[in-house]
Image (cartoon, rainbow, N blue to C red):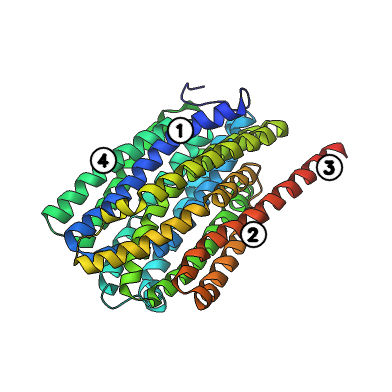
């Protein structure tokens, strides 16, 4: 077995999870950093209109990409459980079937989004000033969907067998390339938002290639032709894991799209401020997302090895790690958030001041809700690693209800502040459901063992 894999069924759960997630945090930080550079370069070079066009595309971009990412996450759970059980033959079969399903999904999703993009942008009340720029930006990004799916699928496979170093190398390399291409395409060639999108797609191709090369070199992941022959039973298992996560992500995204529509209704300046702060939201969440990936791999391997006791220990350690992370990030955002936002905007001073005021208010509310978000991450990823993707899907419905309800009702009571609080109310509602669902799932497993 390659030294680049890691068996997480032995050793201190807290130390394993923390050390495993550190490279993921570093990689995701680089990924978020180049997303921020996208925003910075566009805002400083092209102005507020281009900034609003790129930033306001975030929810729709995530809505589409998260469908593919959800499938990749689900397929990786099967890989982790097979690895934990020592079933290398079943692991390779699951990997081969995952490739078939992923390729089919990309073709379907790509076709639909290119056909429906313009009607959806109209439905979201995208301002006329930004409509053509937003449409062009998203069409280019979605054109690279195959590369994005490839990276998420391959990096998920690697993490499932304990390799979090290669995805770090891939994301770091891609981030550095993306930054250089941003400056070249936007500041030098003056391609505007199209240049940002092209840079992102090319960088995704680089990260996808690095992970693919690493997989080919792993003996445990060497797929044969027989592994690529359609296996309906294996495909059903994989879809039972991946589809609920995709639906969960899509459900969350629908709530975000409704929220974006409400934001657009507050006017162009408010939209620019909120959207700029939303770009920082990815950086705020990066440690939680990284911790989630480590927990899912840990819980998946230990469920495969029938070590439920270690799954419970892992959750307890992860909660402590997650709450400490959320406190640290909240302090940084509260102290330096406005200064960071100011880096992204270059326009008329009066306009900039309004944009920064709206954006900073959102950051303050967001930082107050971070503990709830990180509790959500810990319980959701533990459940997914245990093989339960249904309860996390229901949590996505809870997020949808809370986010839409908050977005539509709270602004009637407290104006723009209602938009800010709609986001954290969604986090808290989903976290409560996940905590209840985890202990229900745990009770069912333990009861089945005693019978």
- Lower position in the chain sequence, tag 3 or tag 4: 4
Instruction: Place residue 186 in its image quadrant.
Output: bottom left
Q: CA distance from mark 1 to mark 3?
A: 35 Å
Q: Earlier in the sequence, mark 1 or mark 4?
A: 1
Q: Which residue is mark 1?
A: 22
Secondary structure state at the residue bearing disc 3: helix
Q: CA distance from mark 1 to mark 4?
A: 19 Å
Q: Secondary structure at mark 4?
A: helix
Q: If the image is split into quadrants, where does the C terminus sit? A: top right
Query: Which numbered tag is attached to residue 176?
Result: 4
The image shows residue 138 at horizontal and vertical percentages of 32, 64
In the rendered structure, which disc, 3 or 2, sits on the residue that comes first in sequence? 2
- Residue for badge 2: 394
Count residues near mark 1 (Cα–Cα under 10 Å), then give few for <14, some for 14-19, many for 20+: some
Classify mark 2: helix, strand or loop.
helix
Is any atom of residue 230 visible in this view?
Answer: no
Distance between the alpha carbons at the discs numbered 3 and 2? 23 Å
Disc 3 vs disc 2: Cβ atoms closer than 8 Å?
no
> Measured from the top left, where is residue 255 in percent x and y?
51, 67
Per the rendering, the mark at residue 447 is 3
What separation in Å lies between label 2 and label 1 (alpha carbons)? 29 Å
Question: Which residue occupies 31% across, 61% down?
Answer: 356
Q: Are marks 2 and 1 in contact (CB under 8 Å)?
A: no
Q: Are marks 1 and 4 in contact (CB under 8 Å)?
A: no
Would residue 210 be found to the left or right of residue 100 on screen? left
> Is label 1 or label 3 in front?
1
**Residue 365 visible here:** yes
Give the foreground label among 1 and 4: 1
Q: Who comes first in sequence, dot 2 or dot 4?
A: 4
Q: Position of residue 43 (x, y in %)?
A: 23, 59
Of the pair 215 and 289, the residue shown nearer to us: 289
Q: Secondary structure at mark 1?
A: helix
């Amino acid at each position: 077995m390659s030294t680049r894999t890691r068996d997480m069924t032995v050793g201190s759960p807290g130390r394993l999870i923390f050390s495993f997630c550190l490279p993921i945090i570093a990689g995701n930080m680089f990924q978020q950093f180049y997303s921020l550079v996208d925003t910075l370069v566009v805002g400083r070079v092209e102005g507020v209109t281009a900034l609003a066009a790129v930033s306001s595309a975030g929810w729709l971009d995530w809505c589409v990409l998260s469908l593919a990412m959800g499938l990749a996450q689900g397929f990786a759970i099967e890989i982790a459980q097979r690895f934990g059980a020592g079933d290398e033959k079943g692991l390779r079969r699951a990997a081969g079937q995952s490739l078939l399903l992923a390729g089919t999904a990309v073709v379907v999703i790509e076709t639909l989004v290119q056909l429906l993009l313009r009607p959806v942008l109209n439905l979201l009340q995208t301002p006329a000033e930004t409509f053509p720029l937003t449409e062009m930006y998203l069409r280019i990004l979605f054109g690279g969907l195959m590369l994005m799916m490839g990276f998420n699928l391959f990096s998920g496979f690697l993490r499932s067998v304990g390799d979090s170093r290669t995805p770090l190398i891939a994301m770091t390399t891609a981030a550095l390339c993306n930054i250089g291409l941003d400056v070249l395409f936007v500041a030098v060639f003056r391609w505007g938002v199209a240049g940002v999108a092209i840079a992102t797609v090319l960088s995704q191709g680089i990260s996808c290639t690095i992970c693919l090369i690493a997989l080919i070199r792993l003996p445990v992941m060497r797929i044969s032709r027989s592994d690529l022959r359609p296996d309906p039973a294996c495909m059903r298992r994989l879809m039972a894991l991946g589809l609920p996560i995709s639906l969960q992500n899509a459900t969350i995204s629908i709530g975000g799209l409704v929220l974006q529509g409400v934001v657009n209704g507050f006017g162009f300046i408010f939209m620019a401020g909120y959207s700029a702060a939303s770009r920082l939201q990815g950086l705020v969440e990066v440690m939680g997302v990284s911790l989630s990936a480590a927990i899912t791999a840990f819980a998946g391997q230990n469920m495969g090895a029938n070590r439920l006791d270690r799954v419970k220990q892992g959750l307890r350690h992860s909660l402590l790690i997650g709450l400490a992370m959320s406190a640290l990030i909240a302090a940084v955002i509260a102290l330096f958030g406005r200064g960071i936002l100011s880096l992204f905007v270059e326009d008329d001073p009066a306009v900039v001041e309004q944009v920064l005021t709206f954006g900073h208010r959102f950051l303050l509310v967001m930082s107050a809700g971070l503990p709830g978000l990180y509790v959500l991450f810990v319980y959701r990823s533990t459940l997914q690693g245990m093989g339960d993707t249904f309860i996390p899907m229901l949590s996505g419905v809870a997020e949808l209800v809370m986010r839409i309800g908050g977005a539509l009702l709270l602004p009637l009571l407290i104006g723009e502040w209602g938009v800010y609080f709609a986001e954290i109310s969604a986090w808290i509602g989903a976290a409560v459901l996940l905590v209840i669902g985890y202990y229900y799932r745990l009770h069912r497993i333990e009861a089945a063992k005693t019978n």
